[in-house]
Amino acid sequence: MLEPFEFGFMQRAMIAASLVGGVTAAVGVFVILRRLAYIGHGLAHSIFGGAVVSFTLGVNFFLGASIWGAFSVFLINQAARRRQIGGDAAIGIVTTAAFAIGIAVISRARSFTRDFEAALFGEILGITSQDLWMTVAMILLISIVLFLFWKQLVFITFDQDVATAYGIPVRWVEVIFSLILAATVVAALQVLGVTLIAAALVIPPVVARMLTDSFPRMFLIAVAIGALTGLVGVYVSWFVDVSSGATVVLVQAAVFALALLWGIVESRRGRSATRRAERLAGLERALND
Amino acid sequence: MATIAVSELVRLDGVALGYEGHVALRDVNLRIEPGELIGIVGPSGSGKTTLLRALLGETELYAGDALVADNTRVGYVPQVETVDWNFPITVEQVVLLGRWRTRRWLPWVSRSDHARAHEVMEQLGISEFAHRPIRALSGGQQQRSFLGRALVGSPDLLLLDEPTSGVDIKTRHEILHQLAGLNHAGVTVVLTTHDLNGVASHLPRLIALGEETVLADGPPSEVLQPAVLERAYGQPMLVVRSGHETYVLPVPEEAPGAHEGEAVPLGEVEVIAAPDHDDA
């Protein structure tokens, strides 16, 4: 049972998956409450383009992908301000165009196949110590910014209209949040790959939302689910011999299914308790009459 | 350069304002003094919310001068329809949002913020719901929670957008009573309302909007006039006064004299009172 812990690459993979799972869930809480799941999915594809271009130019992956992500966010914000375009169309255009640039570069240089697959599906078992430290640094940066802008983000997410009236610089906080999201996607790219990042951003917060009606509790539950499923996913992948990124997301999906089932059972139990109480009250009334 | 008098809290001079190049209101001249209680009335789309947001500095100014006295703390209560009810937040957390400026770079709130929030919730009668999710409350309790968020910052000027929409008569009465109490305590209150009979007619000053401008500004006896209301709402209105009470009723188009400002025969008027008020 402890076999996976004996190997350095598995230790690094489990640490990276826990950290990335936690941070994607933390940022994902704001993503799902602001109904921005689409931007998470789009940015993952956009940053894939950046990863490919940085590889071609020989630039550090984290640096290149981050700059590409930030530039995509800037373009999305600029395009979304035009009423004729709108936010969702701006995301669709910018992120698919950025993704297409990556595909175009790959089709010109065919030696990319392995790296292409790694960026698409993640290559967590290939994480080096240097990659891990870079991931830790990015997560630390994201956490600090989340910490500092917590109140502003909560206010804007709950009631953007009034946040402006209370002096919150909504447009700036929006840009900062988009940059946090881009950084999160970059940090998660190597672990989960483009195709699975959106799931890691969405599933833990949705499960947490199903379990609580308090925002701070939702945040903590989501981070715990993200971190634990990251760890368990990589651990399980050792035994089932399946891609680690896919296993992490499948474990999260299983947690979601359990939460859904629990919710259905609870609401049925609540309904039958109400019916029982109504029947008892009716009986009591009949006896009194 | 335009200046604001010491006795004024808000001053709008020849203002034209709106959003994204579209002028919603023009030629607006307005003075608000500290301690006033004002209602803004008019049909949907007449610019009530726009005028309120102009006082928050959130509209585009195309002409004139809009001035709010320095260091004025403003509290704002939006229409409840604008709120995201899926957001998991308790009443206490909503009220505490109004204190975001204190320790703004730390995610947690201070003891004094907590104490102030509980003081306000106590004052508004919602402290027993402090830890309940806001979406689980009634319309009146939700409205009071948002009022709490506005009050927790100790505002000098309180702006409320339709604070009594969607609540029952009893709750409406309680909200108005609370606003009157705040006004007596020195808070300047400006609210918008669709309710001419239940709310507007009880306020000391009304501003009627219509035809993209201010049609009338003064006490209800001056503003709730058939001519003003017909211009504002585009249909003839009947104004019935009985002692201190004023009732506004739409006049059927076919009523004789409705457009000429002549007396409209009401026919038989029946006043129904509760049994113990028969002699009233």
Image: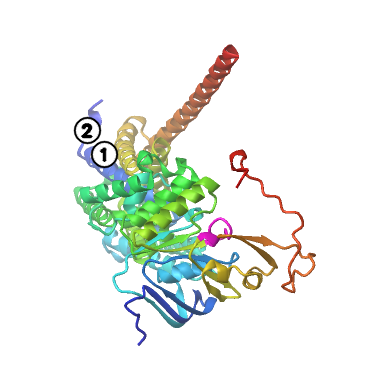
Where does residue B7 sit, x and y in percent of width and height? 34, 76
Crowding at mark 1 (Cα within 10 Å: few <14, some 14-19, many 20+): many
- For the record, the magenta segment spans B193-202
Please give the name of the residue rendered at 57% of the width and 70% of the height, measured from the top-left corner: B223
Which chain contains the residue that carries disc 2?
A: A
Which chain contains the residue that carries disc 1?
A: A
Q: Which residue is mark 2?
A: A5
Task: Report the amino acid beneath label 1.
Answer: Met
Where does residue A150 sit, x and y in percent of width and height? 29, 54
> Left or right: A65 with respect to A133?
right
Quadrant housing residue B250: bottom right
Q: Secondary structure at mark 1?
A: helix
Disc on the earlier residue, 2 or 1: 2
Whether pointer 2 and pointer 1 mark residues with C-beta atoms closer than 8 Å, the reply is yes
Instruction: From the viewer's side, name the closer residue of A93 and B83.
Output: B83
How many marks are shown on the rendered structure?
Answer: 2
Q: Is residue A268 visible?
A: yes
Where does residue A164 sit, x and y in percent of width and height? 38, 64
> Left or right: A211 with respect to B163?
left
Q: Which residue is mark 1?
A: A14
Q: Is residue A104 visible?
A: no
Q: Secondary structure at mark 2?
A: helix
Instruction: From the viewer's side, name the closer residue of B59 and A210.
Output: B59
> Left or right: B245 with respect to A153?
right
Where does residue B53 sit, x and y in percent of width and height? 45, 68
Q: Determine whether B230 is above or below A11 in the image.
A: below
